Image: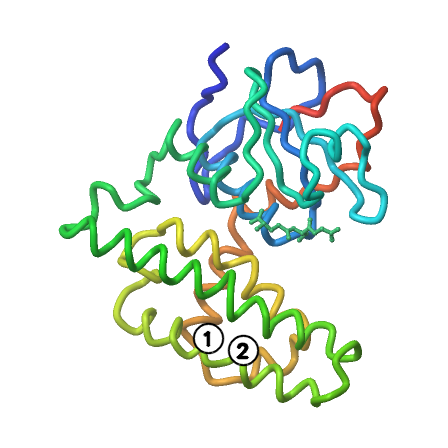
Amino acid sequence: MNTMEKSAPLNGESSTQSSGSAPNLPILYSFRRCPYAMRARMAVSYAGLKVELREIELKNKPSTMLELSSKGTVPILVLPDGQLIEESLDIMLWALSKNDPEDWRQIEAAANQKESAANMADLIAFNDGEFKYWLDKYKYADRHPEHMPEYYRTQALSFLSRLEELLSQNDFLLGNSISLADIAIMPFIRQFASVDSNWFEQINYPLLQQWLNIFLTSNLFSRIMQKYKPWQTQDAPTVF
Ligand SMILES: N[C@@H](CCC(=O)N[C@@H](CS)C(=O)NCC(=O)O)C(=O)O
C-alpha cells in the first residue's frame, strides 16, 4: 500500500490526522511530550506519510509494545512487513527516505555532502549525548542535590552557545534552510527553555530564541502536538 500523501512542510496544510480504519499502515507508538517522539512525528508529518498513532503512557506501557520492543522506549515504528524501527533518528530517516520535499537531509543543498553529513551527525550526537545528559540533570535537579540547578544549567549552556554561533552564520543550524539537525534538536531546546521560561526569555541568545520560536509557532509543530487519549487494544485506529 502506498502510504505517501501530499507533502506537508513547516507551514503547509496537513491532510493527516483523521480517525478511522488503518489497514496496513505503519504503527507509531508515541508519547506526546517526549522530545524523541516529537522529532519522529515531525518527520512523518512533514513527509506527508500516514501512520497509525498509538499514544502511550510511560508509566503504563501497553504489553503489545513491550512484546515488540523490549527496550521499552518511544518512539517505535512497526512497518506493515513487521520490520521494527526502534530509534527516533532512524524513524526520521525512514520518513525522509520516502519523501523529503525541502531537502532536510541536505542531499541537494550541500556542496560538500560528506562534510555536511558529518556536521549533521556530530551536532545531533552532541545533542543526544552530552546536552541531553545535562538537560536531564537540570530538569530533575531535585533528584541530583549534589549541585544547584544553576550548575547543571551552566553545563548545558555551552551547547546553546554553539547553536547561537551557528545561527549567526546562517538562518538555520546548518544552512539557510531547515535540516534534519534543526528538527532533531529543537524539541530538546524547547524542553530546556521550559524548565524556567522566564530565565530563558531574558538570556542573551536572540538568534536561538528566534529560531526556537519559528518552530514552536509553525503549523507543523501544532499538528504534531495534537492531543490523543492513551491507546487501548480495542480502540479504532487513529490515523496520524
Ligand atoms: N534513543 C531513543 C531514546 C528514546 C527515549 O529515551 N524515550 C523516552 C521518552 S522521552 C522513553 O521512552 N523512556 C522510557 C521510560 O521512561 O520508561 C530514541 O532516540 O528513540
Q: Determine crowd level at label 1: few under 14, some 14-19, many 20+ residues with C-alpha closer than 10 A.
A: some
Tell me which residue sits at (69%, 85%) in the image.
149
Q: Which label was assigned to residue 177?
A: none
Tell me which residue sits at (46%, 37%) in the image.
46
At label 1, the amino acid type is Leu
- In the displayed structure image, the side of residue 47 where residue 190 appears, left or right: right
**Circle 2 is placed at which residue position?**
156
**Circle 1 is placed at which residue position?**
160
**114, 189: nearer the viewer:** 114
At label 2, the amino acid type is Ala
Tell me which residue sits at (57%, 17%) in the image.
80
- In the displayed structure image, the side of residue 106 where residue 128 appears, left or right: right
Q: Determine crowd level at label 2: few under 14, some 14-19, many 20+ residues with C-alpha closer than 10 A.
A: many
- In the displayed structure image, the side of residue 124 where residue 188 appears, left or right: right
- Residues under labels 2 and 1: Cα distance? 7 Å
- Residue 65: image location, x then y, percent: 73, 32
Tell me which residue sits at (71%, 25%) in the image.
238
* Image position of 106 with respect to 230: above or below: below
**67, 101: nearer the viewer:** 67
Residue 207: quarter of image: bottom left
- Residue 102: image location, x then y, percent: 32, 40
For label 1, the SS is: helix
The answer to whether mark 2 is within 8 Å of ligand 1 is no
- In the displayed structure image, the side of residue 99 where residue 88 appears, left or right: right
